[in-house]
């Protein structure tokens, strides 16, 4: 009973952290409504946001009192290793910027949606129903949840071939224990795969 309660508490904490991804929807929504011929203005606006964000991170790392002040308010939304390191939001900002710079508009938007919905679905399904372990704590059920979410957001927006390849790549990146944060890797690598397949 105690172990079940601990698992439920751990799951709630992880889902809170994953739910922060939904705040990241502001970037693809902003980019979607932005005029096509003003792409670089969107890039510069996002660069300004990134500068402000990383300036606050620098202050957090160099001034313990600033870090304590911030952690008092958002520690429940951060993993323990993020208390002294760049948070996942920082990696997402970089990934979003690179996607917007490198890829066509809809590919960039979908690559961000893969992270927001796919990663969250992998966590929810994996924690609740994950039984067949694949790599570490990652499960087959979680990966299928990720794939289903990625297909759901991409098929209405992209040609089927591009959507399916991108969804598969995003799911594989989410599954693999790569050294670089998947908030950066999922949009960039899946975006690259969709960009290449769309040119064939």
Image: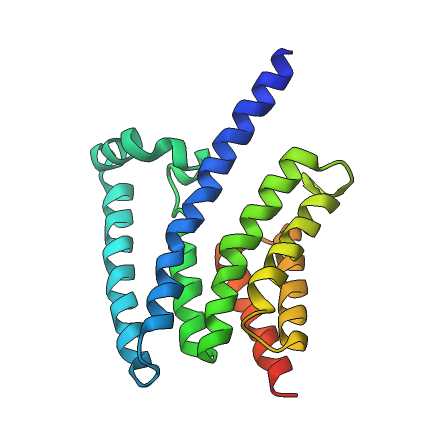
Count of marks placed on residues: 0
Instruction: Please report the residue visible at 32 percent of the width from the left and 86 percent of the height from the top.
Output: 37
Q: Is residue 128 above or below residue 123?
A: above
- Nearest the viewer among 155 and 195 is 155
Direction from residue 162 to residue 89 in the image, left or right: left
Instruction: Please report the residue visible at 40 percent of the width from the left and 63 percent of the height from the top.
Output: 94
Q: Is residue 106 above or below residue 25?
A: below
Q: Quadrant of residue 76?
A: top left
For the rendered model, the colour scheme is: rainbow
In this view, the residue farthest toward the bottom is: 200
Direction from residue 67 to residue 94 in the image, left or right: right
In this view, the residue farthest toward the front is: 156
In this view, the residue farthest toward the right is: 132
Residue 194 location, x and y as percent?
A: 59, 75
Q: Is residue 79 visible?
A: yes
Instruction: Please report the residue visible at 38 percent of the width from the left and 36 percent of the height from the top.
Output: 83
Q: Is residue 185 visible?
A: no
Residue 199 location, x and y as percent?
A: 61, 87
Residue 99 location, x and y as percent?
A: 45, 71
Which quadrant, please, contains the C terminus?
Answer: bottom right
- Nearest the viewer among 17 and 117 is 117
Instruction: Please report the residue visible at 61 percent of the width from the left and 54 percent of the height from the top.
Output: 174
Q: Is residue 38 above or below residue 43?
A: below
């Amino acid at each position: 009973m105690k172990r079940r309660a601990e698992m439920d508490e751990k799951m709630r904490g992880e889902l809170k952290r994953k739910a922060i991804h939904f705040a990241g929807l502001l970037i693809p929504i902003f980019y979607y409504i932005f005029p096509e011929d003003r792409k670089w203005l969107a890039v510069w606006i996002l660069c300004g946001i990134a500068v402000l964000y990383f300036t606050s991170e620098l202050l957090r790392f160099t001034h313990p009192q600033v870090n304590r002040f911030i952690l008092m308010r958002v520690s429940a939304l951060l993993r323990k290793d993020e208390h002294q390191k760049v948070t996942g939001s920082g990696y997402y900002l970089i990934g979003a910027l690179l996607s917007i710079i490198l890829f066509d508009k809809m590919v960039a938007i979908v690559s961000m949606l893969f992270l927001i919905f796919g990663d969250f679905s992998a966590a929810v399904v994996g924690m609740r129903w994950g039984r067949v372990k694949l790599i570490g704590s990652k499960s087959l059920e979680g990966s299928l949840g990720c794939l289903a979410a990625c297909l759901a957001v991409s098929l209405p927006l992209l040609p089927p071939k591009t959507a399916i390849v991108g969804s598969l790549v995003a799911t594989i990146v989410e599954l693999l224990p790569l050294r670089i944060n998947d908030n950066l890797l999922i949009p960039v690598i899946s975006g690259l795969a969709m960009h290449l397949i769309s040119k064939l």
